[in-house]
Amino acid sequence: MKQYFNDTQEIDIEFLSQEFDHDNGIYPINLVVQSKKSLEAGYDASKTGSFKRVKLDFDPTDAFHEYRFDYLPGQVLFYADSKLLAHMKGADMPSSGGHLILQHWSNGNPLWSSGPPKEDATVTVSYVKAYFNSSNSERQSRLVRRCYESSETSVCAINDSDNDEIDSAGASTRRVAQGNSVCVLIVGLVMPFLSHVFLVV
């Protein structure tokens, strides 16, 4: 799961299933904020203050679990099953909004993703919830009006601009991040246990 603006403004929750040790109950998760310091370190965030490897206290392959990050101005909070895993803050935090991406990556690379996988690699996502909060009451009213007629098959855009224009397809034609905003992404998923899978959720 990631929020991506560019290679120096990115928030990641990463699983490398090759690091899972079922025999000893060890399930690490990488919590990453890519920044300009990451770029200077050759895109190795582990050499910066915006990388944490945390051991989960549950097996992420046995059931659905909820993974979340809260992106606020100057800080990012990471959670698993509502338990705070890490709180990163400071000048290295992203300052621009970005796209939300769920990515299952088993590309055959023998290095990072330890591929190719020995069997089909899959991940099952139960749900994705993304919340964009603003203190601007007119933006909140526009969001309610656009989403009022939503259904299971329709898409309700959550725009990040006070001055967004909606085109005939319902898409925003302007994207501007605001400093008074909060973005929360919550994903419920079950990770398969495979020897060679990299997942960015």
Image (cartoon, rainbow, N blue to C red):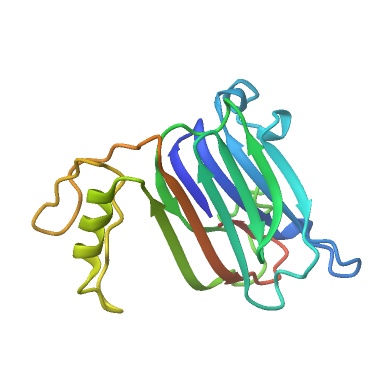
The spot of residue 36 in percent (x, y) is: 55, 24
Pick whichever, 193 or 134, lies toward us: 134
Q: Position of residue 65 (x, y in %)?
A: 64, 71
On screen, residue 152 above or below 116: below
Left or right of 72 on screen, residue 159: left
User: Which quarter of the picture shows residue 141?
Assistant: bottom left
Residue 89 position (above or below residue 27) = above
As displayed, is residue 9 above or below residue 66? above
Write the residue at 51% across / 50% down: 2
Query: Is any part of residue 111 visible from this angle?
Result: no
Residue 100 x %, y %: 43, 52
> Which quadrant of the figure has residue 82?
bottom right
Quadrant of image for the C terminus = bottom right
Q: Is residue 161 visible?
A: yes
In the depicted view, which residue is nearer to us: 68 or 139? 139
Hey, which residue is sitting farthest left in the picture? 168
Residue beneath the point at 11% across and 52% down: 167
Q: Residue at x 36, y 47 (%)?
A: 134
Identity of the residue drawn at 67% across and 43% down? 87
Q: Could you tell whether 25 is left or right of 101 in the image?
A: right
